[in-house]
Image (cartoon, rainbow, N blue to C red):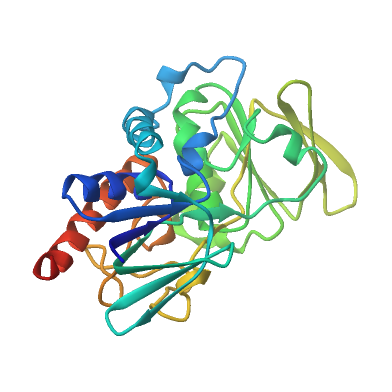
Amino acid sequence: MYDLIVVGGGPAGLTATIYAIRKRLNVLLVTKDLGGKTNFHLGLPWIEDYQVIRGLEIVNKFRSELEYLEFARHMEGVDKITKEGDIFTILTKGGGELQARSVIVATGTRQKRLDVPGEKEYIMKGLCYSALSYAPIFIDRTTVVVGDGDLALRSAAELATVAKHVYLVCESGSFMNSALGKKLDAAGNVTVLEGSKVIEIKGDQFARAAVLQEPSGKRRDIEADGIFIEMALVPNSKMVADMVKLDEQGRIIIDCSNRTSVQGLFAAGDVTNSYAEQVLVAVGEGAKAALSAYEYLLPKL
């Protein structure tokens, strides 16, 4: 029986686990990897690590500690979390069961992909799924953003502040009716390609062009220094979907102390309805969740 089980080894989960260890809790991190999305770095011909704010120093420090502390981690995915009385049961992918008095879910999100030729080959090689993280390095560069929603809109807006030109590829332009959409539509360095869809990614060592199918059926190559797929973020919340309150996007609803609708169950990072999908935000949320879990457990310790 553990005091706390943290599910998910990304920035939020790593931070929560280290904070719990330092609070002398009997804690176990259950995850299929250590680092989560920080294991992926966008490669570009001109990029240097110092140009991107990733929060990698603190994440790598926590990951190194947990690589050493074998007793505090269990490398396996999780299928489901249940609760009976005051005890949580974590069912792992391999059929195992782990029990704890409290749980932090920090399982993050997964990106919706295009599933077109070239996409897999160029992931993180000129093509990625997070314009918000990398926009500042695209000063005077040409970029392509693909998506039909607020995520794509925000990403295009972020890039438009520094990029030479932004092509926003969307099959439906209905989301352009918002204030931000109208601002982008009027911007001199933004071209909205409504009705077009990406059918291939081309390049050499790096992605160099998005091949579009226009509404007329004609193919068109858009050459770019960076291609960003901003279709949607799908929260990995299925394991608790029948337990806690979720928002319309399937994210776990939390309060300012990272508490969910279930007592003793906390959540942190991108899997929640907290603001911004950023590493440093997830690190802070992981720390908050661990402190909240500690306060919850204190009378029981």
Quadrant placement of the N terminus? bottom left
Q: How many marks?
A: 0
Q: Residue at x 28, y 52 (%)?
A: 285
Q: Residue at x 33, y 36 (%)?
A: 62
60 w.r.t. 35: above or below: above
Q: In terms of image quadrants, where is residue 261? A: bottom left
Task: Give residue 131's position: percent from left, percent from top.
Answer: 52, 39
The residue lying toward the viewer, choosing from 164 and 198, is 198
Q: In terms of image quadrants, where is residue 190? A: top right
The residue lying toward the viewer, choosing from 279 and 29, is 29
The residue lying toward the viewer, choosing from 43 and 76, is 76
Task: Give residue 109's position: percent from left, percent from top.
Answer: 51, 55
Task: Give residue 167's position: percent from left, percent from top.
Answer: 64, 39
Q: Residue at x 37, y 80 (%)?
A: 83
Q: Residue at x 56, y 54 (%)?
A: 110
Q: Is residue 73 left or right of residue 120?
A: left
The residue lying toward the viewer, choosing from 238 and 7, is 7
Q: Looking at this view, name the residue that lies furthest to the bottom.
A: 85
210 w.r.t. 91: above or below: above
Q: Is residue 248 left or right of residue 220?
A: left
